[in-house]
Image: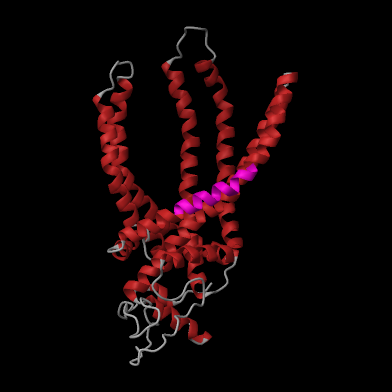
Amino acid sequence: MSHNSGWGQPHPGQPYPGQPYPGQPYPGQPPYPGRPVPPWGGWAPPPPQPGVIPLRPLQLGDVLGGALTAFRRYWKPLTGVILLVQGIGVLLVALAIGITAVGLDSRLKAVFDLPEGQAPAADDVVALLLYGMPVAVLLLLTLVLLTATISALCPAVIQEAVLGRPATFSALWRRCWSRLPSVLGVLLCVGLLAGGPVMVLYAACIPPIIASAHDASPPMAVFVLLLGLLLWMPVAVWVTIRFGLAPAVAVCEGLGPVAAMRRSWQLVGGGWWRTFGIAGLAYLLAAVVGYIVQMPFALLGLFALVPAIMTAGETGDPGTLLFGFGGYLVCVMIGMAIGSVFQLGYPHLVLSLLYVDQRIRKENLAEALAASVTAPAGNAGA
């Protein structure tokens, strides 16, 4: 996969000119970068579009439609990478659950299988919680790794999609893993900035709440917790959006976590509400489409579950009931795996296009990209 130098550093040219040609029949359309403004006020040539977007400042439809087109053109490598990472995570979590279940049987009996009126020992309860900790930690790590992989994968796809270049599974996989440490560092730093105060708040308020669980009135810690969450939530959203382009910066410009976050801060500056609105709309659209994709699989699972429940009620055979639940669970998991490809991939494609848009607006990236398209093959990386 080739990577043009136009992506690596801010283009030294002036910001993209925003004025239309005099007498332009389509007001508001900026001129093609590098072309002189016609003094006679005639027809303006359209901007080049070698890939999924025109090389000019993007509108809402350009961003959402461009991301959808990129997903449609590159769905094979996108689906392959996302499902591969999901499969590895599911196998690891299933292995951890199996290992945990072996030692969990005796603890479950000590906590739940007790004579009436007898309370479980505190040591047994603590041991039961500790048995579940490895599974919870592994599940959290799997989710973080999946998010980081998708955050590194989608900008790599957009780099090729903007210029209309093909991309294979192996090329995207190598590109994704080469930038994964930087993207993972970005996600961890942003997570600590946005979620660190919440963890401190929970650590300070939860113990008093548990200690006063038998009190008739709720403790003051409950109100402190709710007020703190209410006050911090807008700040967390603001921080997350301000650093939302950092994964794309880390992939496209090859920067480390801190430098990528600085660049994202600079690029989003002056366009926070626009970035927030388009990103929120992308996540909403992805959730709706993902839900629509998952519904047929859930209905198919119900067709296997309902007869099993009715048969088990008549015969009293628990094996039939377990078989029905197993079929339902398999159908739901297949639907979730297929729907999650769009749910997880599409918003990050939109964020990557917003990164391209901000660089076009502030650094005239369109001129460098257009030059790379028209340059001879031997000089494309010059």
Quadrant assignment, res 365? bottom left
Q: Is residue 144 left or right of residue 262?
A: right
Q: How many marks?
A: 0
Start-end of magenta stretch: 283-297
**In the image shown, does 311 or 43 lie closer to the viewer?**
43
- Give the answer, above or below, for where 184 lies relative to 39: above
Where residue 46 appears, as percent x and y from the top left, is: 45, 81
Find out whether residue 162 is within the magenta segment. no
**In the image shown, does 234 or 206 lie closer to the viewer?**
234
Where residue 14 appears, as percent x and y from the top left, is: 30, 80
- Give the answer, above or below, for where 232 lies relative to 219: below
Residue pictured at 30% horizontal, 33% vertical? 203
Where residue 336 appears, as percent x and y from the top left, is: 58, 45
Q: Spot the residue most to the bottom.
A: 40
Residue pictured at 31% horizontal, 34% vertical? 202
Whether residue 68 is visible, yes or no, is yes
Where residue 374 appears, as percent x and y from the top left, is: 49, 85
Q: Main secondary structure of the magenta part?
A: helix
Residue pictured at 58% horizontal, 38% vertical? 94
Find out whether residue 287 is within the magenta segment. yes
Q: Is residue 217 left or right of residue 288?
A: left
Residue pictured at 57% horizontal, 48% vertical? 292
Whether residue 254 is visible, yes or no, is no
Image quarter in which the N terminus is found: bottom right
In this figure, which colouring scheme has been used for the structure?
Answer: secondary structure
Image quarter in which the C terminus is found: bottom left
Quadrant assignment, res 261? bottom left
Q: Is residue 200 left or right of residue 42?
A: left
Q: Spot the residue most to the right.
A: 315
